[in-house]
Image: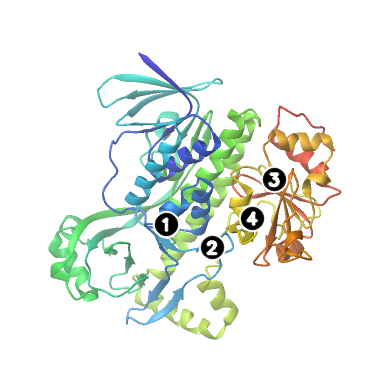
Amino acid sequence: MEKVRTSVAIVGAGPVGCTVANLLGVYGIEAMLIDRSEDILPYPRAVGMDDEALRVFQIAGVAEALLDDVIQNVSLRMFTAKGELFADIRPETREYGWYRRNIFMQQLAEATLREHLTNYPHVRMRLGSEVSALRQDEKGVTLTVTDRDGVQREIEAQYCVAADGGRSTLRDLVGVTLVGNTHPIKWLVVDVRNAELDAPYTALHCDPRRPNVCIHLPFGYRRWEFMVFPHEDAERLVDDASVKALIAPYVKNADDLEVVRARIYTHHSRVADRFVVGRTLFAGDAAHLSPPWIGQGLNLGLRDAGNIAWKLASVIKGQADPGILVSYETERRDHAKAMIDLADTFGRVLMPTNSVKAFVRDVFFKSIGSLSAVRNYVLQMKFKPMPRYDRGLIVEAASDTTHTAVGRMFIQPEVEAGYRKKVKFDDVLGPWFAVVGWRTDPYESLDEETRAFWQSQKAVFVRVERSRSGASRNERLGGTSTTLCVEDLENALEPWFQQQGHTIAIIRPDRYVAALADPFSCADVTRVFAAKVGAKDHELEEA
């Protein structure tokens, strides 16, 4: 049997698998993307993309290309049974550099992600290849695949990422179980073209008689999702006539609609009992299934991709011990569960079929109009649980408060990185580790040993200064041979560092804060972090 070798085998060429492949491409890691299908499904599936997901795509160098097919900053409006607007959610924050609510179509994003992989000759795609067996030991993973020509081959890899969806074959092959619930209520999902409706937003029609969702999609598409009641014939509901009858109250031209797809879906709230089994790591729907109410199903998987890729790259490059891969499950599983729980709560509150519960909900939302703090909490989506890693590859000092940024995503304002050169901060940090100092050169705070560690990690050193802080233009942005210098153009980084009470931040490749330090403690904090990752090239004694 022919054997094919690679460093990382990625099973599943959907958005999550393609994102892992693109990130490994950026990191210079050999990878193979495997999928049973040769083609991209030609209709929309996932449609919501948040700011954290766009930041992952930014690291992969594909965010701007994806935005060609994205409607940015789309509001979420909620309507009572009488058609009254009771909430308009449009978060104003862009703390991570992107809008929080964006609408896209999955098939267009997949095409862009696959096209971008052609930039990396070390990343190959093997489409039309179905995995039928998996063996793994302490040396690697072997996948048995049947190619489109009917020939079986073995793919040998150091590690495997299972991103093969909710019906994951690999999950069954290694004995991973999804834990949670399958909801008894089904939903009819309909994608149409040319709907005559001026509603450039996502609408939740919280009508207990027939809860439904209407989503404005790019390029003339629109999606409706209608609750299916237990007594209804699901097969009849997907007929064009039934679909158009359901949509008719919302549009002027129901008879002229072009129905692209109509399908019955069952919602699941499930999380895998393990995210890491040996040398196989599960991501996306293979690791968790979420109801769609807060649009986080795919976004959870993209966070998985950002967490997995840099850790695999570190291990394969010999910059970290393989044991760090356990931290993927430690960091991602609890947050995935929290997001799914929020989606369940959101669905119960917004989509009850009981008229009394719906009335109570409407009264509550109307009443918060006079309570600015509560209203702001809801309408700015502050209820969304942001990832916060209190275990894993972080170094949290005993003196840090519960509000510490350690284990949280670093902010991303725009900075000036040269005269009139305005860029997003991640574009300065690059795709790997960064050590950022507020009005201090972090490189100068290290000793010879800890400098050698960060140099072995290919870290970037950055000093941030106040905007227009030099006495003249010629004195601004004076970097050194070891440290870049940027200006805090939006005056966002100064209050961030002040709130933390530290002047140096160690930023991981996935943009999470690994540690905070000051010039007098940066070397010691570096030693602790080096011990966490088990760095081999430069063994440092923990202070």
Q: Residue furthest top?
A: 1
Q: Quadrant for the N terminus, please.
A: top left
- What's the distance in space between the residues labelled 2 and 3, CA to CA? 22 Å
From where the camera sits, is residue 274 visible? Answer: no
Using the image, tell me which numbered label, if any, was put on residue 384.
Answer: 2
CA separation in Å, label 3 and label 4? 13 Å
Left or right: 218 in relation to 277? left
The picture places residue 15, in percent across and down from the top left corner, at: 40, 45
Sequence-earlier tag: 2 or 4: 2
Q: Nearer the viewer, mark 3 or mark 4?
A: 4
Which of the two labelled residues, at mark 2 and mark 3, occupies the earlier sequence position?
2
Residue depth check, mark 2 versus mark 4: number of the one nearer the observer: 4
**Percent position of residue 127, x then y:** 32, 32
- Kindly identify the amino acid type of the residue bearing the numbered disc 3: Ile
Colour scheme in the image?
rainbow
Among the two numbered marks 3 and 1 on one chain, the one whose residue lies closer to the N terminus = 1
444 sits left or right of 109 in the view:
right
Is residue 185 something that shows in the picture? yes
Q: Position of residue 472 (x, y in %)?
A: 76, 65
Q: Quadrant of residue 11?
A: top left
For marks 3 and 1, give the one nearer the viewer: 1
In the rendered image, the vertical position of residue 280 relative to residue 204, given as above or below: above
Of mark 3 and mark 4, the one earlier in the sequence is 3
Q: Nearer the viewer, mark 2 or mark 3?
A: 3
Q: Which residue is mark 3?
A: 394
Question: With 102 as the anchor, is 153 left or right in this view?
Answer: left
Which residue is labeled 1 in the image?
67
- The numbered disc on residue 89 is none
Q: Which residue is mark 4?
A: 410
Quote the CA–CA distance across marks 2 and 1. Answer: 23 Å
